[in-house]
Image (cartoon, rainbow, N blue to C red):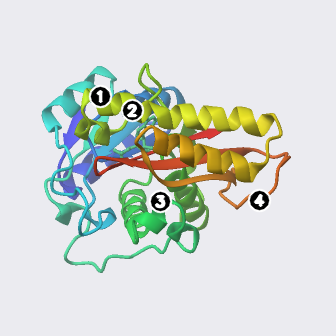
Amino acid sequence: MVITRTREELYKTLEGFSKQTGKLALIPTMGNLHDGHLSLVRLAKLKASKVIATIFVNPLQFGENEDYKKYPRTEKLDVEKLKKEYCDILFIPRSGEEIFSKFEKIRTIDSGSLGSELCGKIRPGHFNGVLTVVNKLFELIKPDIAIFGAKDYQQQILIKKMAKSLHPKISLIKAPIVRSKNGVALSSRNNYLSEKEVDIASNLFKCLQKSVVSYKNNEELKNILNNAKSFLISKKLVPDYFELRDSELNLISKNNFEGNKVFLGSVTINNTRLIDNIEF
Ligand code: AMP
């Protein structure tokens, strides 16, 4: 695996690869890699001849009182894990300057009204930060394919919308959610939880599963959502939101919606916010 830390090193490495044939797949991450991230690398290896992962804890997507400073940084372990998966290139900028150079104005990408809903309501500006950095990575790397996890469902939809307009040549792939044995979606933020709290957190997935069954049994949507919130509270999880949307995240207000849909939930446990969803 070639490790690049500056734009210059990145460009030189990509130039070498561009002379060869085949597709380049990009996997942007913030590091502290777990099996969820690595599943994206494995999928990329199947879809492209070269795979580039990036590790950058993007300050633009953290609010003032959020965990930017304490976000887990585990570079050495991450490099070993990526090597084991035969990742071809890692771009791990030595400073933020390599992404947002002081010689150019940052092009801020506006995540629109959807960017202020669901997670965006709780984290104002978060998705503008995400889209701004992903747009920059797309500009620097110019991949053929980019892979994002379904775990961050709203993020993946917003990136798809942004790419359709600004980077129409890039094919986006959504990778399935990887979970631990008890159903908790793997996340770097699970590191903030005790074993007991991880156990409690598994009730979010249970709640999503129960809600899907209830919907398929034609229960009133309003009751399903109310019951879900009560269930989460009874398990000592504080619901930030629990909603049913269509697969493009438009609101659904009635039962018997035929198309693809998704229950999305966000809960807080001891100051740590976790998200999860089920598509059906
Ligand atoms: P992050 O490092 O949290 O920014 O995540 C980088 C990429 O990994 C994003 O596309 C995430 O959606 C994806 N990802 C994170 N956790 C999981 C998971 N449990 N299963 C699948 N993909 C994931």
Q: How far apart are labels 2 and 4 at the CA level?
A: 29 Å
Element under disc 2: helix
Instruction: For the residues labelled 3 and 4, say whether their Cβ atoms are less than 8 Å apart.
Output: no
Q: Quarter holding the N terminus? A: top left
105 and 279: which is toward the camera? 279
User: Can you tell which mark lies on residue 253?
Assistant: 4
Q: In the displayed image of the protein, which residue is found farthest to the bottom?
A: 105
In front: label 3 or label 2: 2
CA separation in Å, label 1 and label 3:
25 Å
Amino acid at pointer 1: Lys
Check whether the beta carbons of the residues at disc 1 and disc 3 lie within 8 A of each other: no
Label 4 neighbour load within 10 Å: few <14, some 14-19, many 20+ = few
| Residue density around tag 2, few if under 14, some if 14–19, many if 20 or more, within 10 Å | some
Q: Residue at x 63, y 50 (%)?
A: 226
SS at mark 3 in the image: helix
Residue 278, picture quadrant: top right
Q: Nearer the viewer, mark 3 or mark 4?
A: 4
Judge left or right: residue 10 versus residue 260.
Answer: left
**How many angstroms separate mark 1 from mark 4 (CA)?**
36 Å
For residue 98, side relative to residue 108 (left or right): left
Image mark for residue 196:
1
Measured from the top left, where is residue 230 in percent x and y? 55, 46
Kind of element beneath mark 1 = helix
Quarter of the render that holds ligand 1: top left
- Residue 226 has which mark? none
Mark before the other along the chain sequence, 1 or 4: 1
255 is higher (above) or lower (below) than 211 = below
Q: Depth-wise, is mark 2 or mark 4 nearer the camera?
A: 2
